[in-house]
Amino acid sequence: MFSFTLYYHPLYSDGLDRTARFPVDRYRLLAERLVQIDVEQKIRIKEPRLAERNEILLIHEQDYVDRFISGSLTDKEVRRIGLKPWKPEIVPRTFRLVGGALEGLNDLLCGGVIAGNMAGGTHHAFRGEGAGYCIFNDLAVSAEVALMQSNINRVLILDLDVHQGDGTAEIFAGDDRVLTVSLHGENNFPFRKKVSDLDVGFADGTMDDQYLAELDRVLNRLANEEFDLIFFQAGVDGLDSDALGLLNLSREGLARRNRKVFRWRRTLGVPLLIFMGGGYAKPIDDTVDAFCDLFIEGAKEAAFAASV
C-alpha cells in the first residue's frame, strides 16, 4: 500500500487562466495519469494546506508579498512573472503551491524518507520580485523553515531543471546553511546567470550520455559535503521535445537521471523532497509521461526505504 505521499490541489491547474502562455493542464493531467498507472497504490495523493503569510515572509520582502496578495503588482512585475492573464485564483494557488512543498517537508521532518509536491520548484523568484513563471520561491521558503528545526543544519538544493535556479542562488548567496547546485542549459533562460555554489552549464543539444556523466561527477563531489536534507528540483524541460529546453535528453535519459539521484540519496541516507520544476513539451503528453516516471520511481524508492 501507500509508501509515498504526493501533494496536489486542483488549483495547481484551475488557478491559472487557460489562455496563459503556459501548459496549464499539466498538473491535472499528471494527477489523473498517476491514479491510472499506480496500480500497486504506492502513491497517496493529498491536498496541501495554504502556506501562511509569515512563512512566505521568511524569504520574501513584505511589500512584494502584500502587493501580490492585493493584486497591486505593476504591469512590469506581472509581465516578468508571466502566466498572464491573471485570475483572482492565482493568489490561493500560489499559497497552495508553497503549502504543498511545506507539507512534504513536514513529512520528512516527522521521519519520512521521500515526499513530493506535484508542482513548484519555483526557483526564479527573488526576495522582492518574481520571474519566469515563479512568484514565491518554494525551495527557499522550505529551506528556511527546515533550518528553523534544531536537527537541520544544512540543506542541499539540487536543481536539475534546464533553467538555472537564479533566484535560489541569489537568495542564499554567502549562506553556508544552504548548498545551491544547478545543472542547466548554458544558453537558456535566465540569460544573466547568478552564481550558485556549484553551476554546470550544458551546450545546446547535449544528449543523455554527456549529461549523465556530468551528473555522476557532481553527485560524487557532493558525497563529500554534509547536509541533512536534499531538495530535488526535478524539472523535465531538458526533454528533446520540450519547447523551451534546448537540450536533447530522452525520456529514458531523464528516468536514468532520477534513478541516479534516488540511489545516491539511498547511499547517503538523507531524506529527499521532490519539487516538480519545468516541463513544456509539445505534445504536453511527453512532459506528463516524464513526470509520471519521476513520481513512480520516487514511490519505488520510498517503498524500498520502508522495507529496510
Image (spheres, grey):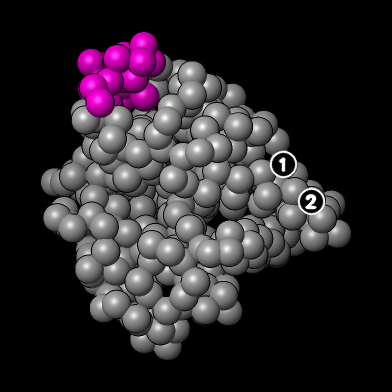
Q: Quadrant of residue 185?
A: bottom left
Residue occupying the point 52% across, 49% down: 23
For the point 36% across and 86% down, which residue is it?
210
Q: Quadrant of residue 263?
A: bottom right
Dots 2, 1 in contact, CB < 8 A: yes
> At label 2, which amino acid type do we have?
Val
What amino acid does circle 1 point to? Ile
Residue 221, position in %: x, y?
30, 73
- The answer to which of marks 2 and 1 sits earlier in the sequence is 2
Cα gap from disc 2 to disc 1, whole angstroms: 9 Å
Could you tell me which quadrant the C terminus lies in? bottom right
Residue range corresponding to the magenta coloring? 56-75
Which residue is label 1 attached to? 45
* Residue labelled with disc 2: 35
Vertically, is 222 above or below 74? Answer: below
Q: Residue at x 61, y 45 (%)?
A: 25
Which of the pair 233/261 is nearer the observer?
A: 233
State the image coordinates of residue 199 (x, y, percent, origin top left): 23, 65
How many neighbours does mark 2 have within 10 angstroms: few (below 14), some (14-19), or many (20 or more)? few
Residue 150 in view of the camera: no
Of circles 2 and 1, the one toward us is 2
At horizontal 36% and vertical 32% (from top left) the residue drawn is: 136
Residue 210 shows in this picture: yes
Label 2: which secondary element: helix
Query: Horizontal placement of 33 versus 265: left or right?
Result: right
> In the image shown, does 34 or 231 lie closer to the viewer?
34
